[in-house]
Image (spheres, rainbow, N blue to C red):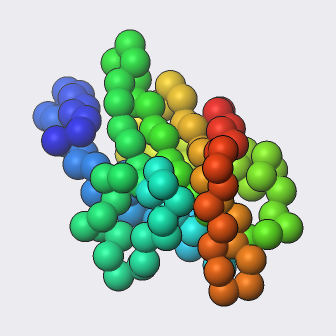
Amino acid sequence: MLLKKENEYGSIGYDKAVITKIIEEIAAGYGDRVFIANHKGKYVPAGKRHKDMSDAIEFSYNNEKLEIKLYLVLKFGMSITKTSMEMIEKIRRQLREILEIETATITVEVVGMASRNSFRKSSSSIEVKG
């Protein structure tokens, strides 16, 4: 269990799969312009995402607040900063509204660019924190 919240009515626990699903749905909203990848820039196909997401989305804690780091490949021509900041805000808003979770930091690391039908892994990645 990743996170446990308690109140006067009882407690509830959230697994990584719940937060991962929220992130996947946000990425799916971008269509074929944003792809979840692992830290090496390898695209994780939609059918295998829940099984293979440990390399694509990392979770940790800092002062009892959740920190999330995810790796993306963007389609060539997408603004790295704008897209990353939009995703960070959408993830933060969904976690707050659906699960009532406050995050300390959400980091999006762009590890490659997609051009037509091929992915190019970058020798250096670009990281955006929010």
Q: Residue at x 60, y 44 (%)?
A: 108
Report whether 101 appears left or right of 1: right
10, 101: nearer the viewer: 101
Looking at the image, the residue that sits furthest to the top is 63
Q: Is residue 97 above or below residue 79?
A: above
Report whether 61 appears left or right of 85: left
Q: Is residue 54 above or below residue 6?
A: below
Looking at the image, the residue that sits furthest to the front is 123
Percent position of residue 6, x then y: 21, 29
Percent position of residue 2, x then y: 23, 39
For the N terminus, the quadrant is: top left
Percent position of residue 110, x then y: 64, 51
Q: Residue at x 42, y 78 (%)?
A: 46
Q: Quadrant of residue 107?
A: top right
Q: Residue at x 81, y 64 (%)?
A: 78
How many numbered tags mark residues here?
0
127, 24: nearer the viewer: 127
Decide if residue 62 is in sight here: yes
Q: Is residue 34 above or below residue 41?
A: below
Q: Residue at x 47, y 51 (%)?
A: 39
For the C terminus, the quadrant is: top right
Percent position of residue 5, x then y: 25, 32
Decide if residue 29 is in sight here: no
